[in-house]
Amino acid sequence: MPVQPFNINICDERPLEYALWAHDPPIPCYRADFPTEFLARTTRTEAGALLFYPPHSTQPVEISVAYMRAGYEADEHDEEGVEARVRIETSRAIKCPSVLGQLAGFKKVQQALAGAGVLERFLPAGSVERVRGTFAPMFPLDETEVGRWARKEAWRVETAGRYVLKPSLEGGGHNVYRGGIPEFLERTPEVEWRNWVLMEMMEPPKLRNVLLSAEGVHEGGVVSELGVFGTCIWRKRKGGGAEIVENRQAGWSFKTKADSVDEMSVVKGYGCFDTPCLVDDLL
């Protein structure tokens, strides 16, 4: 498990680690700070085995799954970070995720998938509109015709309030919202605008509830976000492409925040984990 040093995410990493060791028989799980400690404790054989040298042991173990809890921030990919990621990616260990899997979650890829005629390349005709109906409209800020239109929408105070500006980064805390977009673009070199994606804001139903967090107690308007987890395992084909071994829904999370807050990140203090109460109609 490559991890970030001194990161609060250890609070959800450790239970996974302990559960694996408590399994009967135990499933060994090792942590290594990414990238320095990981590089010091691993090697890759010519056959592609990713070997890890545990502390207080001279005998290596072959890693079957590299569960990436680091490597999602741009500043982690310095020379050492790239070397560590290449070592993992070129090994025969299962990558969770692989580089391709990680790139698929980038906002620029999501924006490309939302383009006209793109989903048709990957999905059966009967599924295209159902999937496309779940997308929020997303636009580039490049020099294309659509990009130039999106730049005008983002630049004008009158229209910017309908949008959120997103970079290709993981997690919350990086977005620029509504009225803050024109000011952000004004101080950002125009050549960097193409690194961002303009997305229409989703407006979930507003309810009243009480939130208790480290920030204190909030009583009043709230909005919630349902996240659905999925697992997908595939095997590369020698001639190109991939064979899907398993692709299924694997759980969900539900988060709630004050309706005055734009961001949604429990770890960064913007919301709380919650449990939904399903009803036929909103009262």
Image (cartoon, rainbow, N blue to C red):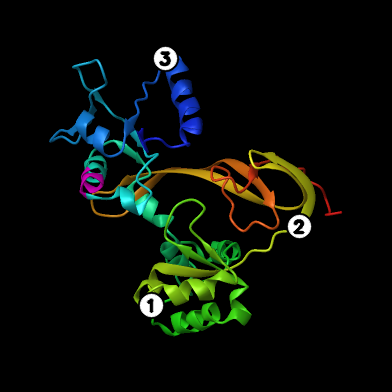
Marks 2, 3: nearer the viewer = 2
Q: Quadrant of the N terminus?
A: top left
Q: Is residue 213 above or below residue 155?
A: above
Q: Which residue is mark 2?
A: 206
Q: Residue at x 64, y 51 (%)?
A: 225
Marks 1, 3: nearer the viewer = 1
Q: Which residue is mark 3?
A: 25
Q: Residue at x 22, y 45 (%)?
A: 86
The location of residue 274, given as percent across then percent down, is: 68, 41
Neighbours of disc 1 within 10 Å: few (<14), some (14-19), many (20+): few
Amino acid at pointer 1: Glu
Amino acid at pointer 2: Lys
Neighbours of disc 2 within 10 Å: few (<14), some (14-19), many (20+): some
Marks 2, 1: nearer the viewer = 1
Q: How many marks?
A: 3
Of residues 23 and 69, the one drawn nearer to the viewer in this rendering: 69
Q: Secondary structure at mark 2?
A: loop
Q: Residue at x 65, y 42 (%)?
A: 215
